[in-house]
Image (tube, grey):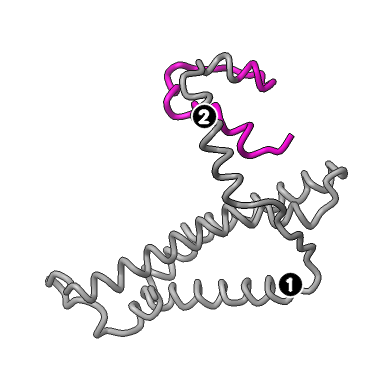
Amino acid sequence: MLTIAAQCSWLQPAMGRRPSKSEAAILYSGLYAMATGVGGVKATLPAHGADQLDHTNKRLMNAFFNWFFFSLAMGGILASTVMVWVEDNKGWKYSFKIATITFSIALCIFAAGLPFYRQTSPTGSSLGRIFKVIKATARNWKTPPQETITENGFVGRHHNKFRQVFYSPFVSEACFDN
């Protein structure tokens, strides 16, 4: 959507004019779609990649995550250097074309591997897990954070400064099947 908006001059507001509602809607829709896609990829790709590997081989798992996050970091560096140069010297439409072509190639490579991926069907009910989270949350609502951390075997520093941000006593019970 952003690539199309950058290519079509009729989707861009005139210089010094506020964008119309349709121009703004296209821009914000493209931004939200991009943010959702990036968030989805960064959240699900590490788990998908790890599912393809033998979990007992720690060296292989470490190598996968090292290369995965190295690639993410390199993508960020390229996006903030090369793509900015392209935007400044060639224009937005070329920058968006490069990003769209690169993403399309990556998507084709990912799709080409579909027949070879390990695919496991989820077990149990999704609603059951949701209710398990709600039940654990209600039961642990008043539990002090220090007790929860000790009770679940997590040993680490606990700072009261970030108490509301990091306090989730139900996570260990709800996310992990014992």
Task: Using the image as rendered, state which of residue 140 and residue 34 is in the foreground.
Answer: 140
Residue 75 picture location, percent across and down: 57, 59
Disc 2 to disc 1, C-alpha distance: 36 Å
Q: Which residue is mark 1?
A: 114
| Quarter location, residue 49 | bottom right
Q: Is residue 151 magenta?
A: yes
Q: Is residue 108 magenta?
A: no
- Identify whether 125 is placed above or below 159: below
Label annotation for residue 168: 2
Q: Mark 2: give few (<14), some (14-19) or many (20+) Cα within 10 Å.
A: some
Label annotation for residue 52: none
Q: Which residues are magenta?
A: 149-178
- Identify whether 127 is placed above or below 100: above
Residue 165 picture location, percent across and down: 44, 29
Residue 168 picture location, percent across and down: 52, 29
Task: Using the image as rendered, state which of residue 26 and residue 167 is in the foreground.
Answer: 167
For image coordinates 66% across by 22% down, the residue present is: 152
Task: Using the image as rendered, state which of residue 47 and residue 95 is in the foreground.
Answer: 47
Quarter of the picture containing the N terminus is bottom left
Task: Using the image as rendered, state which of residue 76 and residue 58 is in the foreground.
Answer: 58
Q: Secondary structure at mark 1?
A: helix
Q: Earlier in the sequence, mark 2 or mark 1?
A: 1
Which residue type does callout 1 highlight? Leu
Quarter of the picture containing the C terminus is top right
Compared across the picture, whether 78 is left or right of 71 comes to left
